[in-house]
Amino acid sequence: MTIPDKIRRIENLHILFWLSKDLCWCFEWKWLGIIMIFPTLSLCVFTTWKMKNNVTETFHNLAVLCWIIANSYWMLSEFFQFDETIIFENVVGKQLALIPFCTGILILIYFYLFKDKR
């Protein structure tokens, strides 16, 4: 199944928003970085939904969605200075990003073990 050009264009636009969000993070442009989370996530959700009939694309887009959530959370933890705050025992705020990061990895492991029929 090929990806329609319109969906591919939206997916590529999503990458532009994602890079813009990370650039804002790098320059510590807090509010612009926070605003950029919404179009980045929205376009990722949209492309995931539009490609729901393509198992390969769906699983990979879900993993990317997890990555963006983790990446956005990590950025917010630094912007609002709870990245080094101890949450429990030896776990600091930014390390909670491991939850969506690992979820994305588990989604792809599941895909490659059980769904990839190539």
Image (tube, rainbow, N blue to C red):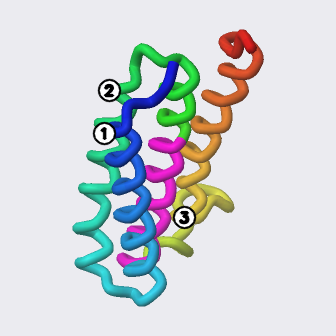
Q: Residues within 10 Å of mark 2 (few under 14, many from 20)?
A: some
Q: Main secondary structure of the magenta part?
A: helix
Position of 56 relative to 82 (above/below): above
Q: Is residue 106 above or below residue 28?
A: above
Outermost residue toward the bottom in this view: 27
Decide which of tag 1 and tag 3 comes sooner along the chain. Answer: 1
Closer-to-camera residue (85/57): 57
Q: Secondary structure at mark 1?
A: helix
Residue placed at 40% from the left, 42% from the top?
8
Residue 103 in the image, given as x and y percentages of width and height: 58, 36
Rendered view: 30 above or below 68: below
Single out the mark in the foreground, 1 or 2. 1
Contact between marks 1 and 2 (CB within 8 A): the answer is: no
Q: Earlier in the sequence, mark 1 or mark 2?
A: 1
Estimate the x, y position of residue 104 in percent, counting from the top left.
59, 38
Q: Is residue 105 found left or right of 62 in the rendered image?
A: right
Let me know if residue 95 is in the magenta part.
no
Front of the two marks 1 and 3: 1
Tell which of 104 and 58 is nearer to you.
58
Label 2: which residue?
A: 50
- C-alpha gap between disc 1 and disc 3: 36 Å
Q: Give the crowd class for mark 3: few <14, some 14-19, many >=20 residues within 10 Å.
A: many
Residue type pointed to by label 1: Lys
* Amino acid type, residue under disc 3 in the picture: Lys
Q: Would you say 36 lies left or right of 93 here?
A: left
For label 1, the residue is 6
Q: Which mark is residue 94?
A: 3
Label 2 or label 3, whichever lies nearer to me, is 2
Residue 26 image point, x, y percent: 48, 84
Which range of residues does the magenta coloring cover? 64-80
